[in-house]
Image: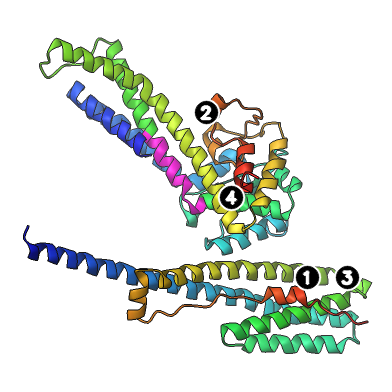
Amino acid sequence: MNTSTISIIVLIVLVLLCITLFNGLVTLRNRAREAWADIEVQLKRRYDLIPNLVNTVKGYATHESQAFEKVSQARSMAMQAGTLSQKGEAENALSGTLKSLFAISEAYPELKANTNFLELQRELSDTENKIQSARRFYNGNVRDLNTKIETFPGNMIAKMFNFAKMDFFDLGDNDAAQNPVEVKF
Amino acid sequence: MTLVFLIVIALGWFFGLYFNNPSIVIIFGVFAIVLNIISYWYSDTVVIKLSGARPATREEFFDLYTVVENLSITAGLPTPKIYVVTDPAPNAFATGRDKNHAAVCATTGLLSILDRSELEGVIAHELSHIGNRDMLVSTVVVVLVGFISIISDIFMRSLWFGGGRRGNDREGESGTIFMIVGIILAILAPLIGTLIQLAISRKREYLADASGALLTRYPEGLASALQKIGQYSAPLRHQSNAIAHLYIADPTGDKKIPWYKTLLLTHPPINDRIKALLGNK
């Protein structure tokens, strides 16, 4: 084998390597995008459950209009939020208002016994779990994508074709632990 | 897996030379392979019928249903069909030819003794079996081991009935050595194949434990569940050896196991699994 044949083979191998890396990056990026869409599906589920919940509570706790207002406002803000960090903040705010609402409902024993209310509470709790699951899946995909973009040799292809790193969906859970919900009676 | 495959090739080569007529072996081999592939392809329905399971509805089994759903989301797998078996012995299994045709089943005994985080550990283990394609792996292994056993059987049979046709002229000495090697291989090969199959099954169980822990980020959940399951001693009522390797714990209910018997287990001993999960603390 003379040098020109060897160099042609090496060139072909390099090109194939580049193609494989590029396709790998595309796959990971699309997976992360799909995972984000899945989170939005679960978030939408939550938005749909909330009006029902508010109406059920209103039936028993007619004077707590402030709490209802806060929940509805937070829900609208969350539905409008665009970027990932905005979404995270809005979701945190919404969770906070919901916690206050549930805390208030503790004072109404008839409400707590209402099967509709219990059902909604259970469904909301399950939806929160599903949002967590979808978040974990999304973060896992983002981690894989970012790792591939940062490590050699992927980083060269990433720079050449402008693959951007994606952000983790961090709901700032630490903040919630540090600032407990206030319950005013 | 490679070792099993190599043994198959070695035997096949040997018999090709010895008999000068490989067609019998091929016919038997193909038959066995086809049978195994059919049972693998329809594994979700076959296994469910074998175990006597019924579909689990969201209303009746909310916890089980939501745990499976949520973990499937985390794993990025489609939600498998969910079944329940009425049996006091705690156990669970997963089956199906691929992630789109998967099924997960738990016993009522399991659902009654585990809390939610322990149930999550168990279901994460079962979903990992689906994600790691363990049904495919074990089917391939079983087919190969079966192939070895059939070939060995044919060889032994041929010896019993006075030997096959020797197409080639061979010198007396090398011919006898050839035959002795063949006999040893024929006796040992199925045995070694089965031991390897069981070792593979145990390794995949450890892998499912690890993948499940990665899924939940909480290995203590599964460790605690295994502890509870291990304390239960009576065997599963509606069991079948054919699907024993799919269950999370050995359904025959053995507890104290000396080391030489561990070679014959489909699952690693529960204490070893707990140690591995908790990091040998």
- A171, A79: nearer the viewer: A171
Q: Are marks 1 and 3 in contact (CB under 8 Å)?
A: no
Picture disc at residue A121: 1
Q: CA distance from mark 1 to mark 3?
A: 10 Å
Q: How much space separates mark 1 and mark 2, taking CA atoms? A: 49 Å
Front disc: 4 or 3:
4
Provide the secondary structure element on which disc 2 rests.
loop
| Quadrant showing the C terminus of chain B | top right
User: Of circles 2 and 3, which is in front?
Assistant: 2
State which mark lies toward you, 1 or 2.
2
Secondary element at image label 4? helix
Question: Of the residues shown, which amino acid type is indicated by label 2?
Answer: Leu
* Left or right: residue A5 compared with residue A183: left
Q: Are marks 1 and 3 on the same chain?
A: yes
Q: Which residue is mark 3?
A: A112
The reply to the same-chain question for discs 2 and 3 is no
Q: Position of residue A16 (x, y in %)?
A: 25, 67
Q: Amino acid at mark 3?
A: Lys
**Residue at left 18%, top 14%?**
B175
Give the distance between the C-alpha atoms of the residues marked 4 and 2, in whole angstroms: 22 Å
- Left or right placement of residue B66 versus residue A146 in this view: right
Amino acid tagged 1? Gln
Q: CA distance from mark 4 to mark 3?
A: 36 Å
Q: Which comes before the other along the chain, label 4 or label 2?
A: 4
Q: Is residue B61 visible?
A: no
State the image coordinates of residue B70 (x, y, percent, origin top left). 62, 62
Front in this rendered view, residue B111 or A4: A4
What residue does disc 2 label?
B264
Pointer 3 local density, CA inside 10 Å: few below 14, some 14–19, many at least 20:
some
Q: Answer above or below: position of A141 versus B22.
A: below
